[in-house]
Amino acid sequence: MNITNFRDLGGMRTIHGRRVRQHKFIRSGQLVGLDEETKRDLVNRYRVTEVVDFRRPFEIQESPDDSIEGITFTNIDLLGMIGARNTSLDDFASIGSVDRVNDHMLGTYHDMVLNPGAQKGFGRFLRIVVGNTQGATLFHCFAGKDRTGFAAALVLWLLEVDDDQIFADYLKTNQERVAANNQLLDQFRAKGFDQDSLDALAVALYVKKEYLIYARQLMIDAYGDVFAYAHQALGFGPDQVEALRRNLLE
């Protein structure tokens, strides 16, 4: 597979001993520049029928997903629904401060959890996943780390996968993205950005456990638990959670 940060979340075990089905729920980075073998694998091996792209319009315009016959593509512009300004990698490098980028990332997670626009987007995402009973849903953003990382954790929490596995999957992005991130940092080094700017950009290119812990705590503080959050904020109630489990668990 020539897709960065690609993984099938099948095989994860819930606290009740059930397992996430293989070839049902898949996360990745953007689907750009795929070879023909990868496209065939997505359709024939992984049975992908739905792709949800969380990117901004400018990201899609710069690098549109490859079209793949038999797969439906849906864009849910989470950051646009929040009303966030377009933040490019150049913007992060220009901030030039590790602490300020870290604060920005925490602010993004805050908005992904509590902003009504993001809640509408994640609600729509959940309904696509629960409705895709015939094949697999693949979801991604640019790097497949923050928007995608929270979306993966949200569904896994609703399935009652244990925290150790959820956080391990979230942090796996840091290993999966090393080569791609180093390439990006080299590009910015070649542009003449200083080390402070490169260090700030590196913060934006990797995930930290504290971001996902913060997101979960926001849900708990505001709603009580992830199930109340899904019901009240995302319009995804107990019957839909049960349907999600029927679809994704074996």
Image (cartoon, rainbow, N blue to C red):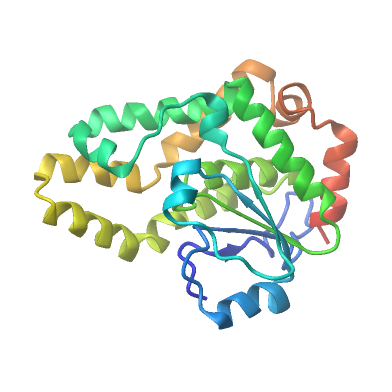
User: 202 above or below 23?
Assistant: above
- Name the foreground residue: 79 vs 45: 79
Residue 56 can be seen, yes or no: no
Residue visible at 46% across and 26% down? Answer: 84
Q: Residue at x 44, y 47 (%)?
A: 59
**Total marks drawn?**
0
Q: Residue furthest front?
A: 61
x, y percent for residue 76:
62, 41
The residue under the point 71% across, 23% down is 233
- Could you tell me if residue 53 is visible in this image? yes
Q: Is 152 rendered above or below residue 22? A: above
Q: Position of residue 131 (x, y in %)?
A: 84, 49
In which image quadrant can residue 117 be found? top right
Drawn side of residue 91 relative to residue 34, left or right: left
**Extreme residue in the bottom direction:** 37
Front residue of this view, candidates 75 and 210? 75
Locate residue 104 relative to residue 35 in the image: left or right.
Answer: left
Nearer the observer, 190 or 236? 190
Name the residue furthest top. 222
Task: Name the residue: 76% across, 60% down.
Answer: 19
For the C terminus, the quadrant is: bottom right
Task: Measuring from the top left, give residue 232's x and y in whole percent.
Answer: 76, 21
Q: In the rendering, at what x and y percent does residue 182 appear?
A: 25, 60
